[in-house]
Image (spheres, grey):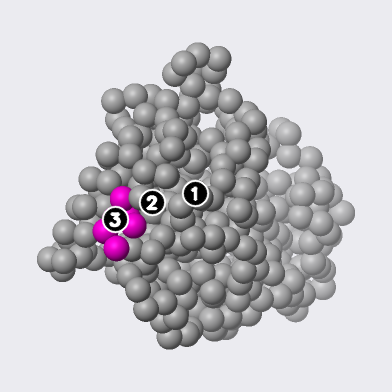
Amino acid sequence: MEMKYFCAPKLSVFLPNSKPGTFKEKFGELKPLAVKTTCPGLAFDFNCGLRLQIPKGNWHVKILDSDSEIVCFDEDVSDILLISLEKFVVRWQFLLWLDGQLVVDHTFNPEGWRVHFCFLPSGMGDRIALFPYMEEFRKKWRCNVSCTVEPYLQEIIRLYFPQIQCSPIPDDSYAAYFPAPGFNPLFLPEEGRKLPMEKFGQQIFGLQHAQKITYYPTKPRQIIEPYVCIAVQASATFKTWLYPDGWLQVVDYLKSLGYRVLCIDKNLQESNYGLTVTCPPNAEDFTGNLPLSERINLLAYADFFIGLPSGLSWLAAASDCPVILISGITPAWFEFNTPYRVINRLVCFGCHNDISLKWPLFQSCPFHKGTDRAFECSKKISPRQVINTINQLRDDLRSNRFSYSNFI
């Protein structure tokens, strides 16, 4: 049987290089088509795009986006497997004629079916940004949702998304998607660097919004004294705060205010790309590869959290812990909404979202490599900026002005 890809006009530039089997190599052997019909050999599903198997015969196939009515395929075919290049949610509609008679008219509708989301390797923050959309999809379509995530995240699904099952891709899934908040246009219809991370889910899941899911603590408060959590590491050291002794000064200031300061990074020390970041010696060492529920139990009772563009900042925000986020590599609009963003706009910043750059550029500063200005976006954020933001946050907490939006 011949295999042929089709797509909407936007992705047509990718068709010449889309060879049969492309996505088998990336995702492993996909399951057989899940939805059989009364016509022998005719089957379909929406696993990694629309897959439509047409048996031998005098068939005419028309495929369109049901919402925009853009026609993406309209041909006479026989003995062929048609697969869409679009791997995000599209409300596909297909009409099939056999010997000139319309025999099938089906529009994407997963109500009552199994839909699976297989999360591709990515950071914890990326997942936390997408999980609420998975739950919103389940509610909107009234379908049975399952997902594949790394073992350390399965506890999050079990505790806060109890209607979603963690499993491999099931054999009977009506649809399966591979959410990946990167820059691949087959999986994310809009250039990811132009979007806030919280909006990736709108594009991938075909939704307008998702309600925030709060990660409530599972245990009573364990620390009596006022305390603050910090995280000084990220998935790459170029995301960290590189002002010399910046963390030492901030921790000393927090302690002068009467706070215990708990460093909750996974590792005591992290080295990559020629840089090393270590837990501040004047902070309490709460590092360790612990279940995320234990981190949530700390964050939910903390006065606030100070971190970076990293998964722990997303975890803190999901735990309703006020977040001070220090970052130069990303613009202020990219991560979740927090009024306590620390950034220096008087120097070069935001290269992560500069679409003129080839990404990833993990090894060096893309604009000022080899000069005194290398990583100035991070090095030029002063402790005074962070301390001023701490004072603003504390004022807002005292006056009850702090709040997070209920919707993403």
Q: Could one spot residue 71 in this view of the protein?
A: no
Specify which label sits upstream in the sequence, 3 or 1. 3
Q: Are marks 2 and 1 in contact (CB under 8 Å)?
A: yes
The image shows residue 73 at horizontal and vertical percentages of 62, 48
Mark 2 sits on what residue?
Answer: 251
| Residue type indicated by callout 1 | Pro
Specify which label sits upstream in the sequence, 2 or 3. 2
Name the element at disc 1: loop
Specify which label sits upstream in the sequence, 2 or 1. 2
Bounds of the magenta span? 253-258
Mark 3 sits on what residue?
Answer: 256
Foreground residue, 386 or 253? 253
The image shows residue 366 at horizontal and vertical percentages of 53, 22
Residue furthest out toward the right? 1
| Residue 256 magenta-highlighted | yes
The image shows residue 152 at horizontal and vertical percentages of 65, 68
Total labels: the figure holds 3
Q: CA distance from mark 2 to mark 3?
A: 9 Å
Identify the residue shown where x is 80% and y is 52%.
24
Foreground residue, 364 or 95? 364
| Residue 227 magenta-highlighted | no
Task: Please give the label number shown on residue 280.
Answer: 1
| Residue type indicated by callout 2 | Val
Q: Is 50 on the left or on the right of 280, as rendered? A: right
| Residue type indicated by callout 3 | Ser
Name the element at disc 2: helix
